[in-house]
Amino acid sequence: MKLRKLLFASAVCLSTVLGAGLAMTSAEAQTLRVGFAAQDVGRLDPHFAVSTTDRIPVSWIFSGLVRFKPGSASPDDIEPDLAERWEHSADGKTWTFFLRKGVQFHHGYGELTADDVVFSLQKAADPKRSAFSGDFRAIESVTAVDPYTVKIVLKENVPSLLGLLTNYSGGFIVSKRAVEEKGDAFARSPVGTGPFQLDKITPNQSAEFTANAAYFRGKPALSGISYRFIPSDASRDLAYQNGELDLSYGKEEQRWVDRMRALPNTVVDVFEPAELAVLNLNTALAPTNDIRIRQAIAYAINRDEIVRWRGKDITRPGLSLVPGGYLGYTADNGLPRFDLNKAKALLAEAGYPNGITIKVIHTQLPEMLSSMQVVQAQLRRAGITLDLQVVEHATFHQQIRQDLSPIVYYSAARFPIADIYLTQFFHGRSTVGTPTAVTNFSHCNVADAEIDAARVSTNEDEQKRLWAEAQRKLIANVCGVPLFEALKVFARSTRVDYGYELKGAMNLGPIITETTRIK
């Protein structure tokens, strides 16, 4: 009898242990493990999230008044998010948004109200508190009509107000109370209303997120997300192949895509928007303040060679200083075509018959570094030697905003209308080092009049004409040299179900929603 009791107790104990183990395994299985090519996150304050590293998790934490339908990067697919509905005046200058009731901020920061929306949009428009302030210059006022109603009045029409208010860049809504209480610490302990909330950051290791059980669209199917920092491509690929990752940031190269597609139980997602990679040439800093040097660089670039190296499935040639497919894009802009002899002649004319060396600050982010090394090899053939000063990615972002590099390689996607790209990268107001700085590394302002006129025009044909003229002027002045357009690439296990078909994601990584699950 004693033996039977002992065996029974042991069986119960073993069952309990096994049960706990199974429960733990099940819980772990619902934590999505994401590998990314970075040393650490930078700033998770969404109004300062300018790098891909930060843009991806910010989209899990925060919401906008409106959002892109999950899986889409098309303006045609904008739908309600924190705002249930909206209306606008006949002249398009007064917009009223009606908020959902009962939406809760993370970590007990209370219900979202109109005051949070007003605070967020005013913060997004303030150059001291946002990297996207230039996008909001047309807004005259944002006011709370009542706790659940927000009125926005414009000084002038903009090509797409809804585009500015999406779950992207300056459109994210933050907790007023959390920002004011946390101050600078908010960048590493953000508070939003999205499906996942930040739990902790372990520097150089990971950022851990837990499901927001009070998410207004419903409790997420996943229990959490482990966002792991693995800067080495080889280490990240090995971690994925060993089953340590469910979703992995991809190398935007054809060889990587082909190799990952050959793995069992693996899907490679290639999706929009394409990031346009540009050599921004500083027109105010030697030696690129000499237009002949800038022209030599432009003629030395062989886009077809870059596309062949990167792969046709994931790369398109950059043919303008606005990405292809954006409203207002034109390839009829006078872009110099590859001509090595012309490049050498221009260099000699500028006083460098034996070549020139240019010191350039560049990021260690693997995909950007490898692409810049291809550019480096191409320019070397023309006698232009790039002395690359490779730094950590966050340092790169800091230094290129201090005019420390005459050439800035920058790759970006924006809301797909020419106005935003032209304004942020090539309008005088956006010049780095100024109070209204955004990402104008070239110091160009030759197309300011066309960019401004197009923004307020209510005639779409006139807008397109002005945007096209702006691109021609910028190309003629060689403010930048377009290189290529890179589609985004991620590999995932077939067990990962996003809950939607991934065709596009403005945050440059898969949107993880309440419907995402591990099968």
Image (cartoon, helix red, strand yellow):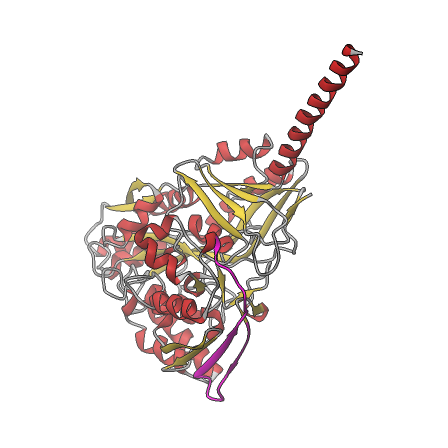
Say whether residue 81 is left or right of residue 186. Answer: right
Say whether residue 193 is left or right of residue 26. Answer: left
- Residue name at image x 21 percent, y 50 percent: 352
Q: Residue 120 in the image: x percent, y percent? A: 39, 66
Foreground pick, 180 / 120: 180
- Residue name at image x 23 percent, y 54 percent: 403
In the image, is residue 101 part of the stretch drawn in magenta? yes
Q: Which residues are magenta?
A: 84-106
Quarter of the image for the N terminus: give it. top right
The number of discs equals 0
On the question of residue 451 being in view, the answer is yes
Foreground pick, 127 / 312: 127
- Residue name at image x 38 percent, y 38 percent: 203
In the image, is residue 366 part of the stretch drawn in magenta? no
Q: Residue 468 in the image: x percent, y percent? A: 42, 74
Q: Residue 263 in the image: x percent, y percent? A: 64, 35
Quarter of the image for the C terminus: give it. top right
On the question of residue 343 being in view, the answer is no
| Farthest bottom residue in view | 90
Foreground pick, 85 / 244: 85
Is 159 drawn above or below residue 270 in the view shown?
A: below
Q: Residue 390 in the image: x percent, y percent? A: 31, 40
| Farthest front residue in view | 1
